[in-house]
């Protein structure tokens, strides 16, 4: 009986810690995660953020959505996916890739920025003088800005929106030049 009571009162054998996945080095937005980027560490369970990942294999092949510091606990909000879109703009969210008419905008926006997406309907690039742009998506949340491109690649920005607005924006971005107005 005394043994049972002693066992019931002893501290947690793990010391209140859990193994979680952390960044093995600083990571830039857009990095595709491989085993060299990740490691498991013991951390105090009470201090873990919501959505902390415990399984390295669950993150392999995922894309980092923003800068990550060495030793940072990786969560569902740090990698691209439906969970990031949902956390950014709510349930039933989608992520839309955009190639902007002016790449310089990509140098001043960051993940988490709220933007409106503007287009000039019915006019190809270079013929927009005097035509008033339309807001094709309001209050989109930037989830990723790609790094400097390699030869032959374009830079893009990924924005999260509710499903209906995302579908309309994706279609508009195929037919018109788009740019962003930053809130």
Image: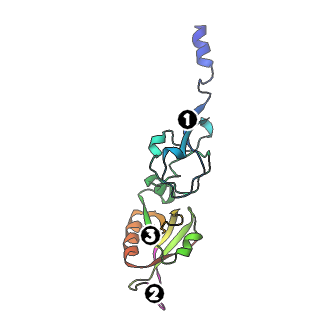
Q: Position of residue 170 (x, y in %)?
A: 39, 69
Q: Which residue is mark 1?
A: 19
Looking at the image, which residue sits at the far top?
1
Position of 180 with respect to 122 (left or right) is right
Q: CA distance from mark 3 to mark 2?
A: 22 Å
Residue at 58%, 37% (x, y): give it: 41
Give the quadrant of residue 181.
bottom right
User: Looking at the image, which residue is at 50% across and 49% down?
Assistant: 76
Relative image position of residue 54 (x, y in whole percent): 51, 39
Disc 2 to disc 1, C-alpha distance: 55 Å
What residue would you read off at disc 2?
126
Would you place residue 181 above or below residue 130 in this image? above
Span highlighted in magenta in the image: 125-136
Q: Tell whether label 2 touches label 3 (CB within 8 Å).
A: no
In this rendering, the label closer to the viewer, 1 or 3: 3
Q: Which mark is residue 152?
A: 3
**Dot 2: within a 10 Å radius of its alpha carbon, few (fewer than 14), some, or many (20 or more) residues?**
few
């Amino acid at each position: 009986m005394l043994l049972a009571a002693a066992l019931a009162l002893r501290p947690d054998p793990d010391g209140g810690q859990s193994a979680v996945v952390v960044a093995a080095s600083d990571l830039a937005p857009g990095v595709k995660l491989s085993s060299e980027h990740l490691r498991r560490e013991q951390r105090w369970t009470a201090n873990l953020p919501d959505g902390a990942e415990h399984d390295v294999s669950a993150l392999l092949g995922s894309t980092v959505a923003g800068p990550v510091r060495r030793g940072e606990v990786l969560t569902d909000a740090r990698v691209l996916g439906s969970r990031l879109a949902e956390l950014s703009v709510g349930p039933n969210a989608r992520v839309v890739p955009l190639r902007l008419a002016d790449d310089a905008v990509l140098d001043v926006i960051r993940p988490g920025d709220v933007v409106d997406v503007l287009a000039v309907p019915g006019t190809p690039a270079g013929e927009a003088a005097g035509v008033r742009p339309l807001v094709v998506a309001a209050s989109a949340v930037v989830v990723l800005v790609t790094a400097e491109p390699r030869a032959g690649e374009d830079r893009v920005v990924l924005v999260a929106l509710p499903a209906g607005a995302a579908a309309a924006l994706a279609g508009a971005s195929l037919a018109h030049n788009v740019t962003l107005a930053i809130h």
